[in-house]
């Protein structure tokens, strides 16, 4: 299993399926996630699918999602 590091070009990450939210606007402008074989999660900008991916542990992603559900990031969206 090959380790994927932060900043790896996302189009070079093989064997993953990139997923975006059903709430995303048509034509991009969203974040896409991919589960990596080692259990980490890669994140990329859908407008730049060849751009770098950021890699987070499952615990980091769980903390982010919990914060989003609790409204901790609402100030960033409006």
Image (tube, rainbow, N blue to C red):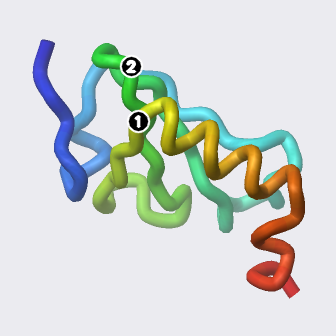
Q: Nearer the viewer, residue 53 or 24?
A: 53
Rendering coords of residue 78 (x, y %):
87, 87
Residue 36 percent location from the top left of the image: 36, 23
Residue at image coords 82%, 60%: 25
Q: Is residue 1 above or below residue 16?
A: above
At 71% from the left and 60% from the top, the residue drawn is 27
Residue placed at 79% from the left, 68% from the top? 72
x then y, percent, for residue 56: 40, 43
Residue nearest the observer in this picture, 55 or 30: 55
Q: Is residue 9 above or below residue 37?
A: below
Whether residue 20 sits left or right of residue 48 in the image: it is: right
Q: Which mark is residue 57?
A: 1
Looking at the image, do the residues carrying marks 2 and 1 touch, with CB atoms under 8 Å apart?
yes
**Residue hosting label 2:** 39
Neighbours of disc 1 within 10 Å: few (<14), some (14-19), many (20+): some
> What residue lies at 14% left-to-right and 28% top-to-bottom?
3
């Amino acid at each position: 299993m090959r380790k994927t590091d932060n900043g790896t070009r996302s189009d070079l990450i093989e064997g993953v399926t990139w997923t975006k939210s059903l709430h995303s606007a048509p034509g991009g402008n969203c974040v896409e996630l991919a589960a990596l074989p080692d259990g980490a999660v890669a994140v990329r900008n859908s407008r730049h699918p060849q751009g770098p991916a950021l890699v987070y542990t499952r615990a980091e992603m769980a903390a982010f999602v919990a914060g989003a559900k609790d409204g901790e990031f609402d100030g960033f969206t409006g």
